[in-house]
Image (tube, rainbow, N blue to C red):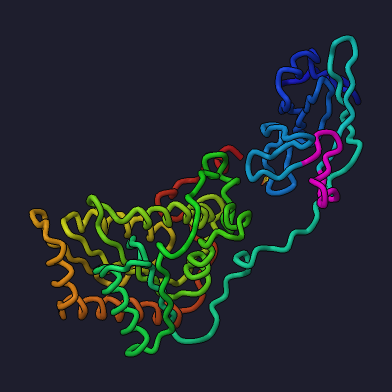
Amino acid sequence: MRPAKSAEWQDLGPAKDFKQNPVTEVRLGKTTVAITCRKGKFGAISGVCNHVGGPLGQGHLDGDYVVCPWHHYKFHWRTGEGEPGFEADRVPSYEVRVKGGRLLLRTKPVTTRNKLPHPPHPLARALRREEGPVRVVGISATVMDRQFPRVSTSELLLQAALDHAKKELGCATRLLKLDSLKFRNCEGYYSKSAHACTWPCSITQMDPKDQMDQVYEALVHWADVVLVATPIRWGAASSLYYKMVERLNCVQNQITIRDNALIRNKVAAFLIIGGQDNIQGVAGQLLGFFSELGFHFPQFPYIAHSRGWSAEDMENNVVFVEHSQELRTGARDLTRRAVELAQALIAQGKGSAKVCRPGRKAFRMAHESAS
Ligand code: FES
C-alpha cells in the first residue's frame, strides 16, 4: 500500500482500509512498516524481521504477536518486542493515530531495533579441513524397516566400498543410512524468498530434533569423499535420495546467491543398483546435482548393475549381487579412484569460496544486473 507524503507524520490512507487485514505492509521510501490492527486498534512496527530480514508486513497475527512469514519469529504488534523471554530482541515500533478517518504514522520510530546475539549454529563454523587421513562417508539411500532388515544390494556394495577404504586405503569412514535418520522434508523456504533459504538450513536451525544435520556435517565439514548408494525405483533414485537432495537446496543456494561454495575439494561417486533399468538416467541425475554442489568426480564416477528390463526375479538379483566378485571389485576400484582424486585435491591446496559464476548460473543474477 502506498502512503501519501507529508512531513513527520505520514498519511497512510483511510483508516478503514487498514481494518481489513490484521497486518498490512507499507513502504515509506526505504523504510518498510508493518501496520497492525487488533480488535479495532492500530499498531505499527518495522516491516523487517530481526532474523534475516523477512517481511513482517506480510506475516500474520498470533494473539499479540506478528509472526514473520519466513521462519516464524514473533514480535509484539505494538511494541515490536520479541516473545516473552526474548523481549530485548525487538524491532522498531512507531506511533500511529487516526485523524479525520485517516491513519497517520509518525515516521520517527518510538523504539529502536535491538538484536540479541544468538549463538551461531555449529554447522555455521568456518570451513577448515582437519588434518588426518582421507575421510570417506557412505550415504545409503535404500529404504527398509530396520527392525526387520533385508538385504539391500546397493547398501551391501556400499559397505564393501567403505570396508576397502578403511582396511586397504587407510581412510576414516562413516556410514549414514538415510532411513535411520529422522528428518523433515524441505518445506520450500526458497520459494518464499531466496534469502529465506539459509545456511545452515532453516529447518536445522529451528528444529533440534531434525537429523539432517548429520548429512550436512558429513558433506560440508567432515568428508573428503562422498559415496552415494541408491536403488533404482521406477527408473529414478530412491525417494529418500530425493528427500535428502531437496534439503541440500540450502547448500546449492549459497553458491547461487552468495558465491559461497561450501563444498570444496571434495569428491563424489555413486553406486546404482536396481532390478530393472534406466541406470544412465539415474546416473545423470546424480552427476548433475552433485556437480552443482561443487563436487569433483573421479574418472568413471559410478558403478551400476541392473537385472534388466524384462526381469521380475528380484530374489535372484539379491543372490547375484551377494556372490558377484566383479561388483565388489568394481566398488573397491571406484573407491580407490575417488580417494586418489581426493588426495590430489587435498595436496593441491585450498579451494576458494569465490567461484566465478558457477555452473548453470553463468550469467549475472537479475538482482545484480539491476544494481
Ligand atoms: S524469522 Fe523472520 S527472517 Fe527468519
Find residue 175 and report its horizontal and vertical position in percent: 41, 74
Residue at position x 72%, y 35% from top?
A: 62
Residue 136 lies within the magenta run: no
Residue that sits furthest to the top in the current view: 100
Rendered view: 112 above or below 351: above
Q: Is residue 296 visible?
A: no
On screen, residue 79 versus residue 362, left or right, reads right
Rendered view: 64 above or below 167: above
Rendered view: 181 above or below 115: below
Residue 76 falls in which quadrant of the image? top right
On screen, residue 271 versus residue 361, left or right, reads left
* Camera-nearest residue between 217 and 194: 217
Rendered view: 83 above or below 294: above
* Camera-nearest residue between 366 and 150: 150
In which quadrant is the N terminus drawn?
top right
Residue at position x 55%, y 81% from top?
A: 130
Secondary structure mostly seen in the magenta stretch: loop
Residue 105 falls in which quadrant of the image? top right
* Camera-nearest residue between 310 and 245: 310
Q: Which residues are magenta?
A: 75-90
Residue that sits furthest to the left in the current view: 310
Residue 89 lies within the magenta run: yes
Can you tell me which quadrant of the image ligand 1 is in? top right
Residue at position x 57%, y 71% from top?
A: 127
Residue 110 falls in which quadrant of the image? top right
* Camera-nearest residue between 215 and 348: 215
Find residue 46 and report its horizontal and vertical position in percent: 79, 36
Residue at position x 57%, y 75% from top?
A: 128
Find residue 265 and report its horizontal and vertical position in percent: 45, 72
